[in-house]
Image (cartoon, rainbow, N blue to C red):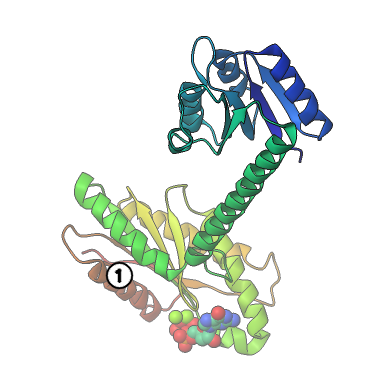
Amino acid sequence: MNARILIVDDDDAIRNALAEYLTILDFITHKAENAEKALSLLKTEAVDVVITDIVMKGMNGLEMMQVIKKNYDTDVIVITGFTDEFSYEEVITRGASDFVFKPFRLDELQIRLKRVLRERALIREQNRLMEKFKEMAITDGLTRLFNSRHFYNELEIEIHRHSRYERPLSMLLIDVDYFKAFNDTHGHLEGDAVLCRIAGVIRSCLRSMDTAYRYGGEEFTVLLPETSCHAAVVVAERINYDVNTKLFNGDNQKTLSVSIGVTEFFPGEPGTEFIRRADKAMYQAKQAGRNQVTLLLP
Ligand code: GH3
Ligand code: MG
Ligand code: MG
């Protein structure tokens, strides 16, 4: 996309000449004759780079730059006369991406502008990659649920929140029943596909503040903040029911079920104890015949 440039200068001749030149170079240009008009324009127009004079009536270019850097993801190139009392260091330290002295050659300005735009694109790409890496680090590759590393981190955070506000916190531990047999019958690939579908069922049963994790191979955990164990049992029952009824869309050849352990956090206990109790509840569900929900109180 063509870069969008806003030119701010109270000198009509400079402002218009610059806009004309940059338009010929295929930039999308906007013009403003003072800082106030420029700031008002920025409220409605997305701008990549502002090229501004410093000395203007009303708010000066550096003051305007401070407002821009605080509120927008926009680069600023500052232009000033040789006689004006601003040093390169001062202008750059205040946040400018570059500094040009008047009278300037248009070719020079073009080179500086292109460099600023290149750096801008590079930083954006770096930020995008960083976000992607961060997401990958907490996501399970198969099911796209959160992974177990993120589970341990979030558990600590929720326990902290629980202790601070004394709100209930519950956990589900979900294990697929006889999954080894399912793999043996239908193949590992089909098993993988089913794990994704189970993840989808779990996700569809949760509220926005609940979080689901692939805890291990065919085991999932759910953290339910602000939720008593009795409300958590209702969620677990819904997951259990939906796995029974919705997983294979009426294909009678295949059935699967899950056993779910439910428990609530006991104030002051370590996270490991909380997990151990959820695991124990799940194990009791297995012992009692599988395909059911078991609540174990602290
Ligand atoms: P139950 O839990 O009801 O006691 O029986 P189970 O057969 O599910 O339990 P077990 O722990 O003996 O076996 C778990 C199986 O889950 C073993 C493995 O083949 C399967 N499994 C674990 N992770 C994956 C995975 O990522 N993909 C597939 N397809 N299968 C997996
Ligand atoms: Mg298991
Ligand atoms: Mg199992």
Q: Where is 183 relative to 119, above or below?
A: below
Q: Residues within 10 Å of mark 1 (few under 14, many from 20)?
A: many
Q: Find the residue positioned furthest to the front.
A: 83
Left/right placement of residue 129 relative to residue 186 reads: left
User: What x and y, as percent, mark residue 95?
Assistant: 47, 36
Q: Quadrant of residue 24?
A: top right
Q: Quadrant of the C terminus?
A: bottom left
Residue found at x 46% / y 32%: 87
Q: Quadrant of residue 15?
A: top right
Residue found at x 70% / y 32%: 4
Q: Where is 137 relative to 227, above or below?
A: below
Q: Secondary structure at mark 1?
A: helix
Left/right placement of residue 114 relative to residue 195 reads: right
Q: Observer-nearest residue: 180 or 53? A: 53
Q: Observer-nearest residue: 180 or 126? A: 126
Residue at numbered disc 1: 275
User: What x and y, as percent, mark residue 2?
Assistant: 76, 38
Q: Quadrant of the N terminus?
A: top right
Q: Where is 218 relative to 204, above or below?
A: below
Q: Find the residue positioned furthest to the bottom.
A: 184
Left/right placement of residue 219 relative to residue 167 reads: right
Left/right placement of residue 52 relative to residue 274 reads: right
Q: Find the residue positioned furthest to the top.
A: 57
Q: Observer-nearest residue: 136 or 93? A: 93
User: What x and y, as percent, mark residue 88?
Assistant: 48, 35
Residue type marked 1: Ile
Is residue 124 visible in the rendered image? The answer is yes
Residue found at x 43% / y 38%: 93
